[in-house]
Amino acid sequence: MKIIIGLLILYILFVLVFYFYQHYFFFRPEILPSNFNYDYPYDFEEKTFEMEDGGSVNSIHFRVPNSRGVIYYFKGNSRSIKGWGKFAADFIGNGYDFFMMDYRGFGKSRGKMTEQKLYDDSQVIYNTK
């Protein structure tokens, strides 16, 4: 019985640690200095959006003439948009603008990321564009 209780306590501790520190397990941000210059072979505009709560979200917008629309791309959970620009080629090659942003705490974006802030930031930027 003591073994079962001991294993149960270990399991509960594991679950609690994993729950409260899950962002360390799932997110692998690459932080870039604010003076970092992106280098892509396509025309792009870099823009930083200042959020009402003091955070900032850095973004890149690849533009094409006579665009058929805009692809609003959400990258994965690691690194920064520095390495994700290669995905623009598929979309701009088919006549679409390509827009992507770094989440707070990634790349040149600043502030603490939460799920709700990700939704809010995405909506603010969508409404602005």
Image (cartoon, grey):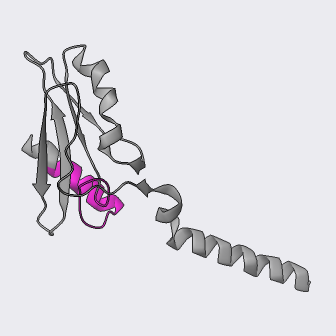
Percent of width and height locating residue 59: 19, 45
Quarter of the image where the N terminus is located: bottom right
Q: Does the magenta run of residues contain 106?
A: yes
121 relative to 98, above or below: below
Query: Which residue is drawn at the image coordinates 23% and 31% (left, top)?
Result: 40
Query: Which residue is drawn at the image coordinates 32% and 63% (left, top)?
Result: 113
Q: Which quadrant of the structure image shows residue 118?
A: bottom left
Percent of width and height locating residue 70: 18, 27
Percent of width and height locating residue 111: 25, 66
Percent of width and height locating residue 22: 51, 65
Query: Which residue is drawn at the image coordinates 34% and 36% (left, top)?
Result: 84
Q: Does the magenta run of residues contain 78?
A: no
5 relative to 49, above or below: below
Quarter of the image where the C terminus is located: top left
Residue closer to the observer: 109 or 4: 109
Q: Residue furthest right?
A: 1
Residue closer to the observer: 32 or 103: 32
Query: Which residue is drawn at the image coordinates 72% and 73% (left, top)?
Result: 11
- Residue range in magenta is 104-124
